[in-house]
Image: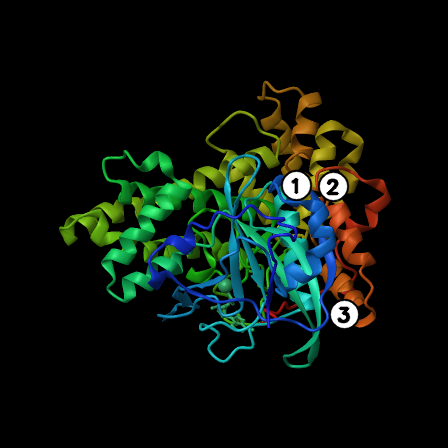
Amino acid sequence: MTIALNASSAQPFAFDNSYARLPQQFFTRQAPSEVTEPWLIKLNEPLASELGLDVEALRRDGAAIFAGNLVPEGADPLAMAYAGHQFGSFVPLLGDGRAILLGEVIDRQGQRRDIQLKGAGQTPYSRGGDGRAALGPVLREYIVSEAMYALGVPATRALAAVSTGQPVYRESVLPGAVFTRVAASHVRVGTFQFFAARGDADGTRALADYVIDRHYPELKDAANPYLALFEAVCERQAALIARWLHIGFIHGVMNTDNMTVSGETIDFGPCAFMDDYDPATVFSSIDQNGRYAYASQPGIGQWNLARLGETLLPLIDADTEKAVEAANVVIGNYGERFQIHWLRGMREKIGLSSVEDDDLELIQSLLAAMQAGQADFTLAFRRLSHLAADESAEASFLATFRDPSAAREWLLRWRQRLSRESQTGAARGPAMLSVNPAFIPRNHRIEQAITAAVEDGDFSLFEALLTVLAKPYEEQPAFSAYMGPPKPDERVLQTFCGT
Ligand code: AMP
Ligand code: MG
């Protein structure tokens, strides 16, 4: 049984639940299922304040609330309906099989944010799954989503993690946990597909209007708001995926149900950051064909967005031919949009403030040298940033390459290019350090933190990682060990969904 707070109890959330006011086919009301022994692993207090929540009340009641045992006043718990292409195959009904939207709050900036429990028990969309989450993946999502935020990449946030005291049965028996996710919204490309696949034109339109209202209100007055919506989502996703590439992030499961229309990164399953630069890098154990490899992500983004465009066709124009033509122009421009974002960020990474035609080639030849020399992606750019301010750092930059000959030649070309910059060397160093992180959530560190927590109930490594990753662009000498790539025996070759 799930207990509801009575009026005299704390009301940590000022809920205003717009999704619950949408037509009934959008969701199914579903309360979370109670767990036996809720224990609060972590409450993100700065985020709770940003959301305008009662932090004091959450310190007291957070374990019960974030486990789903105590449904706070004003919540209207529901599981959202959606469909999706999973590894290219269409599944007409997925939905929240283990996630429950408690409701929405308006944050201190006036932005509407979803509060969702992930792993809070079965829903009508569970399709035989247990509705639960294991501790390891919950900690992974907590660490990586907060790291993304600190790195400046749009992403859902982590509000809390609780352990349930109950086992979950996967390939082995694992401790269970519930993750509390905060999102600009949980509307996915797959949400649009859900209505389109059922031929529910009213549903598609209601969803599109909801998304415009919530995420793109400036488009209401556009000549064709639905075409403008499609274009705006393409723009945000192009910008987002470019940011992923800039920091070496591999999402791992870019199914259309894991792509938001808000432009936030969502669903941190088998995601991971690359160590050595290799565009073909894949970590996910379920991605055996490398569909979602590092360098494939921009193209997959376009593929997913084309699926979104298909759902919007009837809204874009009653004349299908005209609708297809208009949507094709938008999807055709995606590559260029992506390239603009990617190139802008890559120029910053190598310290260029002006634009020259050969910059792309200069960037590509550095990446080629990194790939051939098996350079660590993050360290190489960080050390290049040091080199921009201090000539004596050249040796440490070159030391990131197994064979530094190509990198040495590249430095000559780089310096020639810099000589045509108006930006001074003194300004260049700090500018590069502010875009090339010292710290990323390296896979082996995440694994170590998870192992300590799962096997020994020791959360100190988890806490340490959160601390260091909160300031990824600062030097933090006390944590210098967290900068480096894994030793050969620490290397993580595969990551798992943990579902
Ligand atoms: P994901 O791979 O996490 O994006 O999930 C894909 C789909 O599987 C979504 O509809 C999830 O709700 C569902 N799902 C994943 N894990 C579980 C689980 N343990 N129980 C029920 N449904 C699940
Ligand atoms: Mg998902």
Left or right, 142 with respect to 243, comes to right
| Residue on which the image places disc 3 | 454
Question: Residue 49's mark?
Answer: 1
Colouring style = rainbow
Please count the marks in the image: 3
Mark sitting earlier along the chain (1/3) = 1
Amino acid type at image mark 3: Val
Is disc 1's CB within 8 Å of ligand 2?
no
Rendering coords of residue 303 (x, y %)? 37, 57
Left or right, 460 with respect to 369, comes to right
Is disc 2's CB within 8 Å of ligand 1?
no
Q: Which of marks 2 and 3 is in front?
A: 3
Residue at 79% from the left image edge and 40% from the top image edge: 395
Amino acid type at image mark 2: Phe
Q: Which of 226 and 86 is in front in this view?
A: 226
Question: What is the spatial separation of the Cα atoms under label 2 and label 1, in whole angstroms?
Answer: 41 Å
Q: Which of marks 2 and 1 is in front?
A: 1
Question: Residue 397's mark?
Answer: 2
